[in-house]
């Protein structure tokens, strides 16, 4: 009984390790994190310039 349970558990773990579904999800999460970091850095660098442009546009409106 215990041997059968152990074999089934080992086969289940082996099957989970072989599956690549989790790998794809991890890759998408890493890509999303990289895009978020790039966007935050770009906003930090360009934030002042964008604010100046919007202020100029806002002040030129009647």
Image (cartoon, rainbow, N blue to C red):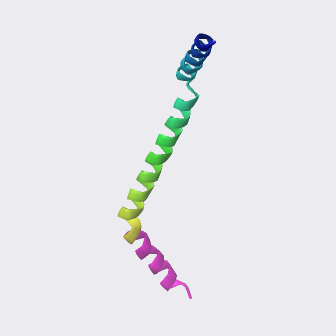
- Which residue shows up at 38% across the image and 63% down it? 44
- Count the labels in the image: 0
33 or 18, which lies in front? 18
- Which residue shows up at 44% across the image and 46% down it? 34
**In the image, farthest residue toward the bottom:** 62
| Residue 60 magenta | yes
- 49 shown above or below 30: below
- 1 shown above or below 25: above
- Which residue shows up at 56% across the image and 88% down it? 62
Magenta stretch prevailing secondary structure: helix
| Residue 38 magenta | no
**Measured from the top left, where is residue 53 in percent x and y?**
44, 74
In the picture, measured across the screen, residue 52 lies left or right of residue 8, that is left
- Which residue shows up at 55% across the image and 25% down it? 20
In the picture, measured across the screen, residue 51 lies left or right of residue 23, that is left
- 25 shown above or below 44: above
- 38 shown above or below 18: below
Q: Quadrant of the N terminus?
A: top right
**Measured from the top left, where is residue 45 in percent x and y?**
35, 62
**In the image, farthest residue toward the front:** 1
8 or 5, which lies in front? 5
**Measured from the top left, where is residue 46 in percent x and y?**
38, 64
Query: Which residues lie in the magenta part?
Result: 49-62
**Measured from the top left, where is residue 19 in percent x and y?**
57, 22
């Amino acid at each position: 009984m215990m041997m059968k349970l152990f074999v089934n558990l080992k086969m289940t773990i082996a099957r989970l390790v072989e599956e690549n579904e989790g790998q794809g999800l991890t890759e998408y999460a890493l890509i999303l994190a990289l895009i978020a970091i790039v966007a935050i850095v770009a906003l930090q660098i360009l934030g002042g310039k964008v604010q100046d442009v919007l202020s100029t546009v806002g002040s030129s409106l009647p």
